[in-house]
Structures are given as structure tokens and as C-alpha cells.
Image: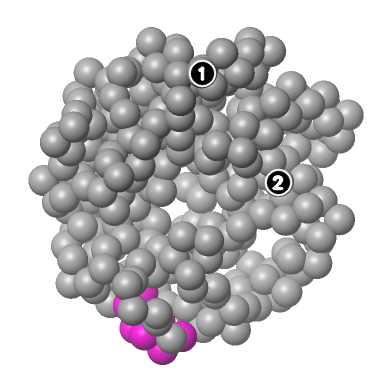
Amino acid sequence: MSSSIFHGLSAFPITPCDSSGRVDESSLSKVIARLADARVDSIGLIGSTGTYMYLDRAERQRAFEIATNIAGSETPIIVGVGALRTDAAEQFAKDAEQAGASGLLLAPVSYTPLNDEEVFQHYASVAGATGLPLCIYNNPTTTHFTFSVSLIERLSGIDNIVALKNPGAPASEMAAVIKPLRDAVPSDFSVGFSGDWFAANALLAGGDAWYSVAGGLLPVPCLALARAAQSLNQDEVKRIDGLFQPLWDLFKELTSLRVMYAAAEILELTSCKPPRPILPVEKSEYSRIAKALESLPI
């Protein structure tokens, strides 16, 4: 199965909801339209930035329908389908396929720590539930599970599992991160990275995709950074990344999710807050976030 949709800039938007957890159609439509208009390479719907674990099945379906209606068929939509139970993740995958998704993103979410065999069986079951290509989401900070290279190699042999979303690393370490992964997986298997402040260097080092939090709200400057890295223009990467540095600093200090909700409000895209128990950033921080946005072509 082709991994072609897992490349370039994959933009991960927030999923604006009201206080009861119902998706705000107007706000989500505005956010998705920005991404489609900017022609991002794909939209990562209901990923971690999209707070997938805080949405029930009905609201996930509602988000799918809103996004596919706005984005149309030209922009691939990769849908997060993580769940505590394998059968639930299978159902979310089927729902996404029925709604018109182009691909799936799956993290090994669990309350009880999982071992490698449990994760392997979980992925095999979800990958077999649809005909959609699936991306492994290695997110140890959130899931407390770290994929070994040997497990990724084993999973890459399963039909439909065609890509990896891996944590980024400092520029000096990226080549050492990528090489063993490339050696372990098929040549057409996509190796992509998250962690926005690492992403440009990941692309420069040969990564296939940047799975971007900032891209979900600021697609124009993120596309510029991604394209510079893809063309191996190091000077331009350094210049654009420098414009992003105040935002990267805020991501590290306040968390990217909270900053993106505040930024969306500053840009007048939504007044929705993160799902409780997550609290929004203090209003006193909004001026710092607004200043970080000022240097970016929005």
C-alpha cells in the first residue's frame, strides 16, 4: 500500500468544542478552510492537538464530516483513531474510512502499561479493520510507550502499515535517529517527525514528513519552512526557523496545545477553550503569544 500521503507538511489543527464536548462547526470549518486554502500536504485531523482522547464517537464522526466537507477531495485527511480498547479503535477506523479519510494515525493509548506483543496485536487488528494506510504514532511523552526499532520493523511488515510519526531530535542527532529506521523498514515506508522545533532539521536530514502542531493554525509560514527544508536550502531554513523561535519557546514553556488555543482566539477563529481538565493559558500570556505571531506571515 502506498505511503504517498504521509509526506511534506501534515497540519494538525485543534478541534474546537463547547464546554459539553460538542464540536463547534463554525470554528472547525474556519480552521480547516485555512489549511485547505494554503494547500498543506495533508490535514492531521483529531490527533493529539485535536484532543482525540477527549471526544466520544459521535463527536469524532461530526469532526470527520465537517472536515471532509470543507477540505473536499484535494487535501488528504489523516485521522487519529487511538482508543483505550482495540475494538473501539477498530470502530473509529471504520468510521473514518466511511467519512472519506485518506489515512489513519494510531497511538498505543493505554491506562495499563503495554508490552511489545500487546502493541503489535493492537496495530495488526486496527490495520486490518479498513483498507486505509496507517501511520504508527510513537508519542512516548503522552502514551508512556516507546517503540523500539525492532518493533517498528515488525509492524512495517503488516499490510496497510506504511508510515511512522516519530519524535524529533536535535539536528546533531537526526542522522543517527533516521539511519536505523531506514535500515529496518521497506524503502517506500514513510519516516516522519513531530516536535515543531526539531522538524525542519528532520526534513533536512532526510525525513519524509513534518507532523506539525503550528501547521494546524499557521499553514503559510509552516509550508515555507517545510519547502525550504525539502529543497535543502539551509540558509532559508535558518531564517524562517528564527522567525518561529519565539513561538517554539512558548510551546516549550506553556505547551503547544494551550498556545494554539490561545492563538486561535487571538486570530479570531474561535473562542473555544481546551477540554477540561486542561486549563487555558492565562490571559496575561496572550500578549506574548500575539507578539510571537507578529513576525510570521499568517
Colour style of the rendered protein structure: one colour
- Predominant SS of the magenta segment: helix
Q: Is residue 148 left or right of residue 267?
A: right
* Residue range corresponding to the magenta coloring: 116-123
Q: Which numbered disc flags the more N-terminal residue, 2 or 1?
A: 2
Q: Position of residue 149 (x, y in %)?
A: 62, 78
- In the rendered image, the vertical position of residue 106 relative to residue 25, given as above or below: below
Q: Quadrant of the N terminus?
A: bottom left
**Badge nearest the viewer, 2 or 1:** 1
What element does badge 1 sit on?
helix
Type of residue at label 1?
A: Ser
Most extreme residue toward the left is 58
Between 58 and 271, the residue placed more toward the observer is 271
Residue 212 shows in this picture? yes
Which residue is labeled 1 in the image?
Answer: 284
Which residue is labeled 2 in the image?
Answer: 198
- In the rendered image, the vertical position of residue 182 relative to residue 245, given as above or below: below
Q: Quadrant of residue 285 in the image?
A: top right
Question: Which residue is rendered at x = 18% and y = 32% of the image?
Answer: 19
Q: Residues within 10 Å of mark 2 (few under 14, many from 20)?
A: some
Q: Position of residue 74 (x, y in %)?
A: 38, 30
Q: Would you say residue 226 sits in the magenta stretch?
A: no
Question: Which residue is rendered at x = 77% and y = 45% of the image?
Answer: 201
Q: Residues within 10 Å of mark 1 (few under 14, many from 20)?
A: few
Type of residue at label 2?
A: Phe
What element does badge 2 sit on?
helix
